[in-house]
Image (tube, helix red, strand yellow):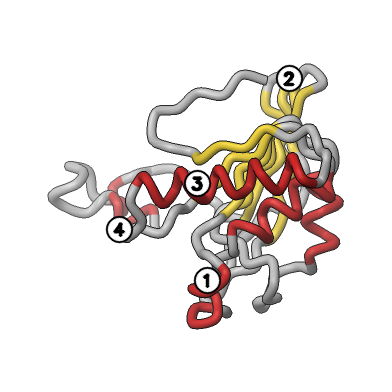
Amino acid sequence: MLARTMEAPNFPVNFDSIHANISYQNTCIDSYTLSSMIITPIALSHPNQGSGYKFEEDGKSFVFLTDNELRFKHEGGLDFQNYLEFSQGADLLFHDAEYKEEEYKKTGGWGHSCYKDALNLAIDAGVKKLGLFHHNQERIDDEIDAIVNDCREEIKKRGKNLECSAVGQSMEFKL
C-alpha cells in the first residue's frame, strides 16, 4: 500500500530507491503510548476488517469506531459486549451510524450500523458524548437532523445524560 502511494504522479521517488529497512506489522494488537497519550486498538466488525481506537490522555477518553456493524459479527470482528466494554465511560464516542432501521433490512452484513444501535451502545456504555459518524451519502442535512433529534428524544425518554450530535467535516470537540 505504501509503495502504491509513491507511484507517479503522486510522488517523485520510486519506492525501490529508498535505502531504508522498513518492516510492517499486519495489525496493532497492543496499546501503545505516544507522548502522554495511550492509544488502544480494537478489531472492527466489517467485511474488510479494520481497527477502531481509544485515545486516552489526562483522564479523558475518545473512542473512534467507524465502519463497525454492531448487529453482525464479521470475520475478525467482535461481539457487541466487547465494543461496550471498550467504550465504557468514554468522554466521546464516534460510531458508525449509517442506516435507519428500514434501510438496514436491505444492507445488513455490509459492515455498517443503524444509528439506534450506536445510540444503545453509547447509553449502555455510559458515554458522555456521542458523535454519529459515517452518514449515508444519499442523506440530506434535514434527514440527519431528524436522526439526531430522534436520538435526543430517546435519550430524554430514558432519563440519560448523554449529548448527541452528527459529526461533520471540520468540527471540533473539546473534552
Could you tell which of marks 4 and 2 lies nearer the N-terminus?
A: 4
| Dot 1 amino acid type | Asn
| Dot 3 amino acid type | Asn
| Mark 1 secondary-structure assignment | loop
Residue for badge 1: 48
Q: Are marks 3 and 4 in contact (CB under 8 Å)?
A: no
Residue 91's disc is none
| Mark 3 secondary-structure assignment | loop
Residue at the extreme bottom of the image, as rendered: 106
Residue for badge 2: 36
Could you tell which of marks 3 and 2 lies nearer the N-terminus?
A: 3
| Dot 4 amino acid type | Arg
Q: Depth-wise, is mark 4 or mark 1 nearer the camera?
A: 1
Q: Which is more toward the observer, 95 or 14?
A: 95
Residue 4's disc is 4
Q: Quadrant of the C terminus?
A: top right
User: How far is mark 1 from mark 3, CA to CA?
Assistant: 28 Å
Where residue 13 sits, quadrant-wise, is top left
User: How far is mark 3 from mark 4, CA to CA?
Assistant: 18 Å
